[in-house]
Image (spheres, rainbow, N blue to C red):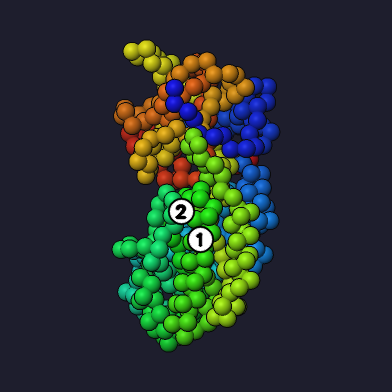
Amino acid sequence: MKPLGPIPPGFAARDGVLAIDGVAVTDLVERAGGTPLFVYSAGMMRSKVQQLRAAMPDRLAIHYAVKANPYDPVLRVFSELVDGFDIASGGELALVRAAGIDPARVSFAGPGKRDAELDAAICARVTLNLESEAEADRALAIGARAGLTPRLAIRVNPDFDLKGSGMKMGGGAKPFGVDAERVPALARRIIAAGAEWRGFHIFAGSQSLDSEAIADTQAQTLALAARLAEDSGAALPHCNLGGGFGIPYFPGDTPVDISRIGALLEERFAALPAVLADTAFCIELGRYLVGESGVYLARIVDRKISHGEVFLVTDGGLHHQLAASGNFGTVVRRNYPAAIATRFAAPVAEEASIVGCLCTPLDRLADKAGLPHAEPGDLVAIFCAGAYGASASPSAFLGQGPALEMLV
């Protein structure tokens, strides 16, 4: 029997059925019109941001990374909670604008920005985090043609990475950002060209649960920002310190200690060099803010036994939850937190695998897990589904189509 990942705090049973913000999932499914269904808790999002603000220095702004979950109602919740938004495409720019978010609160990172995307961002007064010298040239030329002053920052490829991160975004040869030693010359060129200088974006890694490693990376980031600002010969108006705060997905994972990170960052802010005295700082978080607030619900359509093993076949699968199936960057497949939602208070009664409706052996949402006895009609819940689920999975695979989504 293989263990399941830890269910995030805040979920409880109501008459034996999983409830989200006090509403039984059976009622939510009926309200939505069926399954598969992603449910996102606005209350959990608000609580997460409140906890983060209480732990972090007052000087530190909080940005939401739209790529984690671009669902319109989610964006509207965060528009009232965070200080800024970070996007990675022109499509995400259209989504934040449709959600009524002021583009002046938005920054745009990502390699391979097309000219049309640069033009749309410059016209909307979005801050561009430049990924190369060539991208800087294109942005300046587009601004000149439009008669507008582009708001430009440099995404820095630091000479270090975030230790223990699930995805390393800095250190060594990377498609992201400008190598640190080339940043000062580019900054001087941007300023001389008359652009609005917006500073640095320094992102070293993501999905780390090591609080000390995150704090150490923040210290290295501040030191690098100071050195690059000095070498650029200009004040640094803004610095995005990146993110990296992970959430527990797998057995044995423990939550990141935000109080420890915040305390250490407060100490470092108190001892900043003069070149950073007036710099505005932010962190950019997506998964940490929204990941635990989401639950993926699928209905069991068949219960079958093959060679003595129980398979609970659902109407969902990896086409909605690629990461939970172990096919989105995981080297060794481990079980996400999962449960039989309609028997949430029932004890473990058997070993069973939760699989999807796709004709591929990769479509497995829980492998040989300890679960209550379940039958067709029961609902399965996959937790930690608020980030990189609906928008990061191949919903068109085999013509299955997207899942329903709702905010409570």
Q: Tell me the quadrant of the picture where the N terminus can be found.
A: top left
Q: Quadrant of residue 81?
A: bottom right
Label 1 and label 2: CA atoms lie apart by: 14 Å
Tell me what residue is drawn at x 68 percent, y 26 percent: 14
Residue 113 seen in render: yes
Q: Which residue is drawn at 54% across and 34% down?
A: 6
Task: Look at the image and tell me in which quarter the C terminus lies.
Answer: top right
Query: Tag 1's secondary structure?
Result: helix
Q: Where is residue 63 in the image (x, y as percent from the top left)?
A: 56, 60
Say whether residue 77 is left or right of residue 363: right
Is residue 386 in sight in this rendering?
Answer: no
Residue 242 in picture, x, y percent from top left: 49, 61
Task: Say which mark, if any, is on residue 206.
Answer: 2
Amino acid at circle 2: Ser
| SS class, disc 2 | strand
Q: Is residue 403 above or below residue 129?
A: above
Q: Are marks 1 and 2 in contact (CB under 8 Å)?
A: no
Near mark 1 (Cα within 10 A), the count class, few <14, some 14-19 or many ≥20, is some
Q: Is residue 52 left or right of residue 372?
A: right
Q: Report the amino acid beneath label 1.
A: Asp
Mark 1 or 2, nearer chain start? 2
How far from the left and from the top, in percent, is residue 123?
A: 47, 72
Mark 2 nearby-residue class (10 Å; few <14, some 14–19, many ≥20) = many
Q: Which of marks 1 and 2 is in front?
A: 1
Q: Nearer the viewer, residue 118 or 178?
A: 178
Q: Position of residue 385 (x, y in %)?
A: 51, 40
Residue pictured at 37% horizontal, 44% vertical: 329
- Residue picked out by circle 1: 216
Q: Which residue is drawn at 42% across and 34% down?
A: 334
Q: Say the numbered circle drawn on residue 179.
A: none
Q: In this view, does 238 lie to the left or right of 173?
A: right
Q: In the drawing, does residue 264 fall left or right of residue 130?
A: right
